[in-house]
Amino acid sequence: MACTVIRVLIVDDHRGIRLGLRAMVDAEPDLEVCGALSAAEIALEQAPSLCPDVVIMDLSMPGMGGIAATRAIREVCPQSHVLVLTWHADSGHVRDALAAGATGYVLKGDEHLDLIESVRAVARGERRLSQKVAGH
Amino acid sequence: MSTPPPEPDSGRPNTVARRALLRFTAVSLLVLVLVIVATFFVSRGVSRDVALRHARTRGVTFAQVVGGPLVDRGVRTGDPTSLKAFSRVMKNRLRDHSMVHIKVWNRRGQVLWSDEPALRGKVFHLEAPVQRLFATGGSVANMSDLRKEENEGDGDHAQLLEVYAATHSVEGSPIIVESYWSTDSINNDARAVMLRIAPLPIGALLLFSLVILPLAWSLARRVDRAQDESRRSLQHALSASDLERRRIARDLHDGVMQDVSGAGYALSAASSALPSEAEASRRLIDEVSGLVRHVGESLRALLADIYPANLARDGLAVAVEELARRAAVEELEVDVQIDQEALSAVPVEVSQLCYRVIREGLRNVLRHAHASQAQVHATAQNGEVFIAVADNGCGFQQRESTEGHLGLRLLEDTLVDLGGSLAVDSGADGGTILSAAFPMEVALR
């Protein structure tokens, strides 16, 4: 199971995003949502037991932000890859996220298929950047 | 984004108060000079009249009391002994230099005696008013005309007072004693009169200025304060509006935008879940999903307009590139040339002002220019920032004037307050160029 299905943990403080994302990811046969959490702190607690292959991480969240959470997740679950999913398209956020250990960086305005493909690529450990930020 | 309003007394170079006072002082000085000049000429005129009157009195007195009673037959006929005696008395009189020359005339216009021996015995044409004195008596006084033939030898004196006084010789023959008086007295008298007259108008004028000056200053300051107050009110209104826009942006970002994205993802999931035979439904859902994503993008563009990119963190170039991307959505291709080297070390306030100018410029292009291409250029040189936003649109003539454009007008006010400028001109090849310049240091106030 672990070899064929990619386990995805969603971390986003917006319920609408969690709902939609869970439905979209779950609709893919090779992807499985193992959790959809509303705060980075909860994700840090549960990540070791959930053992996700990919963590889809929002950046702007109350409390611990996405950047700090990425760094912490990479420490507690080194096997989990972080795919940042945000509206921030500026190079500063991209730079900080990659420096914190994120493997991919996609935008919420990107094509949905690109997002799904990015989840798969990041799970393989490949770096994926949204085309809208790739120039930076 | 908003630039803090300059302090009311922060030394703006051209305050209303300062301009008004300078104008007032200049006009006062001009009036003072005019009054002094006028006083001088009036004093001189008065002194001249007084001097002429004195000279006439003295000339008549001299003619009747001294000159006339000494002219006897001998003098009239040119007897050397008589002339010698007469000359002694006359020259004695000339010694104090108040009287410069003396001539004695007979009815024929002959000089019976003159202190200039060369003139004695010569005959000249006497002017009618003088000639009339032989019949009527009395006197004629005027400033002497040095061009007259009879005044040869008077070149040492620029002007003299000339008095013709009618009298009689010892034998009763009508004669005229002509005396010339120095004008030195005129100048002395003029000075004295001026010293007596001038203090009145000049003093009154100075006193008036002293009374008016504080009033003018106070009025001008009041105008200055009113302008500052109005500027501050405007800035407060803009700040309040800015805060409100940020609040709306935050609410939109935290609520609507995320829900819209989530709905888009859910639609994608629904599309995937449809059986393969429901092709038409899947296409419809995919289209709706695309629409929803577009709504999200549009909202993001709107929010980016309200929440400018993080200038402090990413720099001006990144922020302007973002503006260019958004313009591209509206089919305006923007070429961005930011002189990173010159602008990299500027304070964030300067970056914010640059961003505001460029954003307003591009907004103007999008709204009014009907352009397909635009160029943004920003650089800094010798402590001054230069920004230009050019387009290939319909040109300035056909567009609204800057006067009528609130955004540009407010921006212009801000730049002028900071010692800068904003201009909108037609480009050489059509289109419009918005150019702004402002000092880097002043922008920090």
Image (spheres, rainbow, N blue to C red):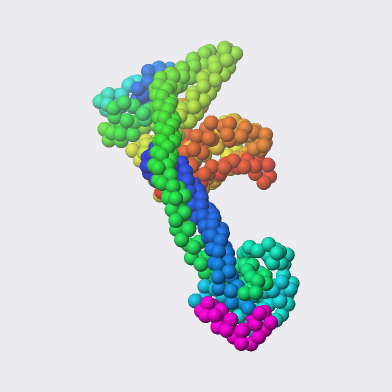
Looking at the image, can residue B381 be seen?
A: no
Of B117 and B423, which appears nearest the observer? B117
Residue B192 against residue A47 in the figure, above or below: below
Percent across and percent down for residue A53 are 36, 29
Up the image or down, B27 lies above or below B46; here it is: above
User: What secondary structure do most residues of the magenta stretch adopt?
Assistant: helix
Q: What residue appears at the point 41 percent right and 18 percent down from the top-left corner?
A: A16
Location of residue A125 with respect to B252 vertically, above or below: below
Q: Nearer the viewer, residue A93 or B299?
A: B299
Query: Residue B429, percent across and down?
Result: 68, 45
State left or right for residue B172 relative to residue A96: right
Residues shaded magenta: B73-95
* Residue drawn at x 69%, y 74% as measured from the top left: B106
- At horizontal 50% and vertical 29% (from top left) the residue drawn is B301
Most foreground residue, B212 or B285: B212
Q: In which quarter of the image is residue A65?
A: top left
Q: In this orientation, does residue B4 appear?
A: yes
